[in-house]
Amino acid sequence: MVALISDDLEKTKDIQGVKIGPLLAVLLSGAFVAILSETILNVAINAIMTNFEINSSVAQWLVTGYMLVIGIVVPISAYFMRRFSTRQLFITAMSLFTLGTLIAGFSPTFSILLIGRLTQAVGTAIMLPVLTNTILAVIPIQRRGAAMGMVGLVIMFAPAIGPTLSGLIIESLSWRWLFYLTFPIAAVSLLIGMKVLVNVTETSKPKLDILSFILSTLGFGGIVYGFSAAGKGDANFTDPFVLTSLLVGLTSLILFFWRQLKLENPLLNVRVLRYPMFSLGLLLVMLTMMTMFAMMLILPIYMQGAILLSAVATGLVMLPGGLINGAISPVMGRLFDKWGPRPLLIPGTIILAITVFMYRFAVPGVSTVFLVILQAILMIAVAMIMMPAQTNGLNQIPEKLHPHGTAIYNTLMQISGAIGAALFISVMENGQQNYLTDLGVTNPSVQESLDALTYGSQQSFSTGFYLAIAAIIIALFIRKSKQGKQSD
């Protein structure tokens, strides 16, 4: 990972004479292995179900629980970043992740496996904001694009290779090797971090508002869980438990925001939303995340169920797009530093809309090459949008609000991913049902089921197209940011 840090960043030093290259290399390496764990277990769910003799609704907690913990912990990361140093947070995050990996690898029961998985998630939730906030603290505003581009590489490359790597390992080894092989990487990253990491942010002793913490947990946790549950299995938005989770989450979130505006030292300073470029960038990132996460969920279902590709072929179709996205993210960062956000955001959102619309032509019998090209273009568009929108938004807010801005971005990115997945799944399933209802069929044939899935998937692609159009409109209003004043 050290080799991936650009020469100019390696030579850059902060006011204490600390080299930025080794600092970012350690943080990026830790973030890489943490983010990799988010998707590496997806392919192993069936093997774990067989091993522990559990059903899919129980096994899915390995995925849903991971997202839920991140949704709960990330919002309070602003408090952690003000209370503890960079070094303390990194060591804590990587220690928890490494411990969780060890527990999961040797777990004798599913309950122990879940405990290990959730421990990993706590470490990941701490790591992600620390990485972004450190970049904002040590990289001058005119060079942040290049550094954030490296973050984009990690965030997209890790989940892109996760399912493919997982499939190859499980094909010849036990699912436990997913943890056995992750453990030494995490342990080495932790040991190197303990040796080379230094503190780059100022710390204080803010008071933890317990009521805000409770409301944050119920609010963000309820929404993430509600939408995650609505996008899995037989559950949908009419399920009483899903509705209750969403209602509790939304009510708690409203009370949480109201309380933050009343507190002199809020747990999460939502006043950052009054900075227009921050808010517009946040909306653009959320729309892009909704579209990207949902497409990455719908496409495998569609390609395997309607186009009749194998699981291996589906993974290979989607792999190049993720790799290309990771490879060009640093390039987009440099272009952002040179040109600003608009020359990337406006073309990027237009390409996103066109590409999602083109998926309507991906009917059964379509060329696999066509699917690979579409997926690659989709992920190029995402690279053109995500980093410039986020970096430009964070650039506008004052330095003292960076922990809060980082926490809000990371939290709402997780929430938007869960919302997008649930929304697109719901649209697809409703489209399938409406198609069969219009045919007057109660026991569809194989061909009728295939046609219904095709129709439902096309409805999902149309929904993605509408979201992309909204993204284009937002991109038109974004301008290059200037650093906010410290007194704000």
Image: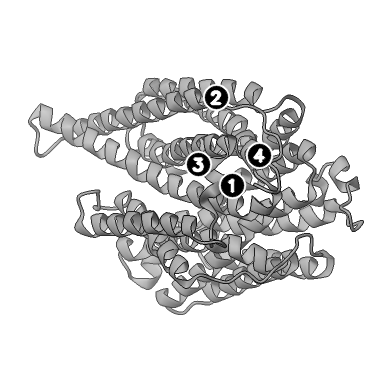
**Looking at the picture, how far across and down is residue 208, in whole percent?**
55, 71
Q: What separation in Å lies between label 3 and label 1 (alpha carbons)?
A: 9 Å
Comes first in the chain, label 3 or label 1 = 1
Which amino acid does the dot numbered 1 rest on?
A: Ile
**Residue 432 disc label:** none
Report whether 2 appears left or right of 159: right
Residue pictured at 56% horizontal, 39% vertical: 319
Q: Which residue is mark 3?
A: 315
Which amino acid does the dot numbered 4 rest on?
A: Gln
Comes first in the chain, label 1 or label 4 = 1
Q: Are marks 1 and 2 in contact (CB under 8 Å)?
A: no
Q: Which residue is mark 1?
A: 161
Q: Secondary structure at mark 2?
A: loop
**Circle 1: is it few (<14), some (14-19), or many (20+) Cα within 10 Å?**
many
The residue mark sitting in front, 3 or 2, is: 2
Comes first in the chain, label 4 or label 2 = 4
Q: Are marks 4 and 3 in contact (CB under 8 Å)?
A: no
Comes first in the chain, label 3 or label 2 = 3
Comes first in the chain, label 4 or label 3 = 3
Q: Which residue is mark 4?
A: 396
